[in-house]
Image: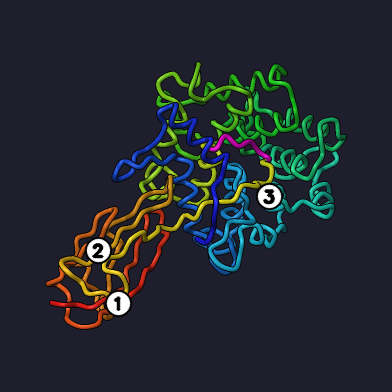
Amino acid sequence: MSRAGGAARTHAVVTTLCALGALGTLAGGASASPLERALDYLSARQDPATGAVGPEVGRAADTAWTAMAAAGAAESPVAWTRGTGTLASAVGALPMDATSDLLRVAVARRAAGLVDADLAARVGAQQSADGSFPGGPIATAWGILAVRAVGRNAGDPALTAAVAALAAQRAPDGGWAATPGAAASDAVATATAIQALRAARMPVGDPVLASARARLLALRDPDGTFGRAPVPTAWAIMAIRSLGERPGAGPWARGGSPVAALQRFQQDDGGVRATPSSGASVFATAVAALAFSRGLLPVSPGTARTPDRAPRVVRRSPASGDVVRGVLSVRYEDERGGTGIDPSRTTIMVNGADITRTTRVTPFTLQVRQSALPLGTLSVSVLVRDRAGHATRSEWSVVGSG
């Protein structure tokens, strides 16, 4: 990925996590935060041509959520690029046909710095006369986040009406349910509503939020998760922080911190599993990244330049044109805080033939004995991959001496 510089807030978050002992350890002892590993995974899944992110290029949810995650870590979606397309340009091209798409994309467009009068008008046109947004409590909560994203502040009539409508949509237990009219609330809907009400500047002592907090705490599992799954746990972490509380302290941490529980769902490649039994997904990883970053919805546009997340070849021996004497070696490294080099996916080609099987490959070096190389001029191509999926190719010519 062609990016330079560093993200100040990302590394500030890393420093904090280090102090809390929340860092994972990569091969060789290099430390990486869950946040940076998640961002590494997400950036490796960006389409170079369009800037969109996800297994289905242009899929609205994946691209929108990645933009929010990047901005939550203070990284600029404008700077996220692996080719001609940027993450910001991909967000600008997302469809906004359905109400749910429009509201989510409005929040993502704020993260990308793409809010304009037309977007504000489109969000406002979706609001019903009673202040709610079509689709139930979650849609109304997202409506509040979208109204805030397009620049409406506390006291604005549209925002006031939406807050009143969301409060009226509560379940009898004090939380909110994903399904309108359901008797029992769930963690995702309740956490979304809490974030929306806090974004609208509802005081934490308000009875609506007090009962919502109590309900969210009651939905917590003994192991620190919510819904025993990563996405509800990430949502809950964000809601807890929006209340001004620490998810790793007090009643939220009894039996285990939700943050530590969320980290258990993160894979070696930085991705976060969508469910306890499934593989990683862009959506789950982006939501988890927001929780790790401590960003609160709607996130403001990121401004920090982002790091180059591709591995780097730092030394080749012998140099181009020189004779191999003893060993041909390559030294490489991943970016600071990355997922680390994957030796099993690092390869070497000599004159078009794959000789990786006869090569010693570690997370830091690749070595080939002189005796394993042909005589004469050799075209060498080394492909280095990190666990997230970023790759770097280094090519040069040497002379084999047998």
- Per the image, the residue denoted by label 2 is 329
Single out the mark in the foreground, 1 or 2: 1
Upstream in sequence: badge 1 or badge 3: 3
Image coordinates for residue 309, horizontal then vertical, percent = 47, 54
Q: Residue at x 13, y 77 (%)?
A: 402
The residue carrying pointer 2 sits among few (fewer than 14), some (14 to 19) or many (20 or more) residues within 10 Å by Cα, namely some
Residue 152 is left or right of residue 88, and the answer is right
- Per the image, the residue denoted by label 1 is 321
- Dominant SS type (magenta): loop
Q: Which residues are magenta?
A: 293-298
Amino acid type of the residue that numbered disc 2 sits on in the rendered structure = Ser
Q: Nearer the viewer, residue 181 or 81?
A: 81
Amino acid type of the residue that numbered disc 1 sits on in the rendered structure = Gly
Single out the mark in the foreground, 1 or 3: 1
Would you place residue 400 above or below residue 4 in this image?
below
Asked whether the residues under the numbered discs 1 and 2 touch, taking CB atoms below 8 Å apart as contact, a structural biologist would say no
Upstream in sequence: badge 2 or badge 3: 3
